[in-house]
Each structure stands twice: as C-alpha cells, then as structure tokens.
Image (cartoon, rainbow, N blue to C red):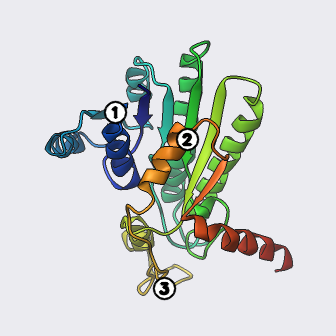
Amino acid sequence: MTSILITGAGTGFGRMLAFSLARRGHTVHAGVELTSQVGTLRQEAEALGLTLEVSRLDITSARDRARILREDFDILVNNAGIGQGGSLADMPDDVLREQYEINFFATVALTREYLHARRNSGPTRIVFMSSIGGILTVPFAGAYCGSKHALETLAQSLHQEFAERDVTIATINPGPYQTNFNDLIMEGPRYWQSENDLFDYSALRFDMPQYKNDQDIETMADITLDPKSRFRNILPRELEQHIREQEQAVWNW
C-alpha cells in the first residue's frame, strides 16, 4: 500500500485524483487550502465509502508544511495552484507575485522539505500537476503560463539531478478540461482592472473547447503510481502532437 500526499485536493483534479487513488486502496492524505473544505471533502469521501485523510494545507504556510511532513509519504503530488488572467502589461504586482508565490515558490519549498524528509527513506516519487501552459503560452494568461514554465524547469532540473538516486519525477500536463479553472482564470481581471489599463477585459472569456473533467483521471492516477512513467505526460494524449507543433512554430515567429 502506497502513502500519497496530494496538495490542492479540495477541488478539481486534486479532489478527483484523491478519490481515484483512495478507491484503489492506497493511503491518501488530501491537503486542502481552506479549513472550510476539510469537512466537505471528508463527507464526500464517506458518502463514497472511501477512507481519506483530509487536513488543511496552505502550501504558502511554513507551519502547515512542517506539520504535514511529520507524516511519511511515498509520493508527493504537487497539485495546488491558482490562475490569474489578464495582460502582464496591466496586471498589478501583488496579483502577479501571488501567482508565482503559490504555483512556484511555495511548491519549491514543499518539494525541498519533502525531499529532505525522505532522505534515505527508500523509493520516492514527486508528480507535478503542470499544464500545457507550462509548454505553450497563450494571450492574457502570461502570468499563469509563466508560473507553469517555471514549474517545468523545477521538475526538469530535479529529474536530471536525482537520476542516479531512488527518486522519480514526472509532470502531468493537462489540456483544457471542464473543471471551471480555465474560465475563472479569464475572470481574474474583473477584480483588479482599472481605467488606466491598456486592454479592455470586459469580453475576456476562455473560448477553447474543453474536455470532460474526469475523462483522464484514471490515467493521472496510473502516472502518479508508476515510477517508470514518462517524465512529461500531456493529457489528453491526442493533444501531444498538436502541442509539439505549436511549440516548434514559435521558432518561426
């Protein structure tokens, strides 16, 4: 039986992945950002007949990180993250900094502390819930994509540095799914926009087709558990060639 810590498990992929792994019989600790999410997730797990450990884990809190790592986990799934939409030409500094604080700096801190806690503890695995936005960049999502590009660099460096040790690293790079996350990114500017902005965000929407939110959860669970998985895992798989072509096209801009 494998012990797994999932951050940002109160909603979206984190929540569904926690349920999937618990359903398979693994020991899953679901970390949620808000105290109000703890009871809700416990009740949902109980209603499904699942055993799930749930506690508050604000990854930006050193105290929360230290508390959670008193337990030992074979696998860390870095899923917690936020998305801020709007042009970097208009976005206020505090909004941009929050984007990186959660998606990158706090994730780096938890990962570092986890690796130190797991020193000489046997096979260890870290899975980063990244995004196709960590490979490509789309208009009005530069802050989010930038934070995911940084996360990709973290994952790639660790993948190479720990290649000769019993530590495996992988990324999951979801495309657009119906988790409501993409839509909320594009709603971001309404909370900070001003009359001095260079762009009008009143009609900003996420207009790409989106896949069913749970269609690849079992594949995500398979990747999480498989120390021999590919390093980078774009989902749905059918998007991989398109992403490769888009990335290559940038060279000809």
Q: Position of residue 109 (x, y in %)?
A: 55, 32
Residue that numbered label 3 is attached to: 200
Residue drawn at (53%, 39%) of the image: 107
| Mark 1 surroundings within 10 Å by alpha-carbon count, few (fewer than 14), some (14 through 19), many (20 or more) | few
Tell me the amino acid under the disc marked 3: Asp
- In the image, taking residue 2 as reference, residue 145 lies left or right, namely right
Marks 1 and 2: in contact by CB < 8 Å?
A: no
Tell me the amino acid under the disc marked 2: Val
Mark 2: secondary structure: strand
Q: Is residue 192 visible?
A: no
Q: Position of residue 1 (x, y in %)?
A: 41, 25
Q: Nearer the viewer, residue 190 or 33?
A: 33
| Mark 3 surroundings within 10 Å by alpha-carbon count, few (fewer than 14), some (14 through 19), many (20 or more) | few
Q: Point out the frontmost of discs 2 and 1.
A: 1
Lower position in the chain sequence, tag 3 or tag 1: 1
Q: Quadrant of the C terminus?
A: bottom right
| Mark 2 surroundings within 10 Å by alpha-carbon count, few (fewer than 14), some (14 through 19), many (20 or more) | many
Q: Position of residue 110 (x, y in %)?
A: 52, 32
Q: Nearer the viewer, residue 184 or 93?
A: 184
Lower position in the chain sequence, tag 2 or tag 3: 2
Q: Point out the frontmost of discs 3 and 1.
A: 1
Residue furthest to the top: 120
Q: Marks 2 and 1, how far apart in space?
A: 19 Å
Marks 1 and 3: in contact by CB < 8 Å?
A: no
Residue that numbered label 1 is attached to: 25
Mark 3: secondary structure: loop
Mark 1: secondary structure: loop
Q: Nearer the viewer, residue 208 or 221?
A: 221
Numbered mark located on residue 127 in the image: 2
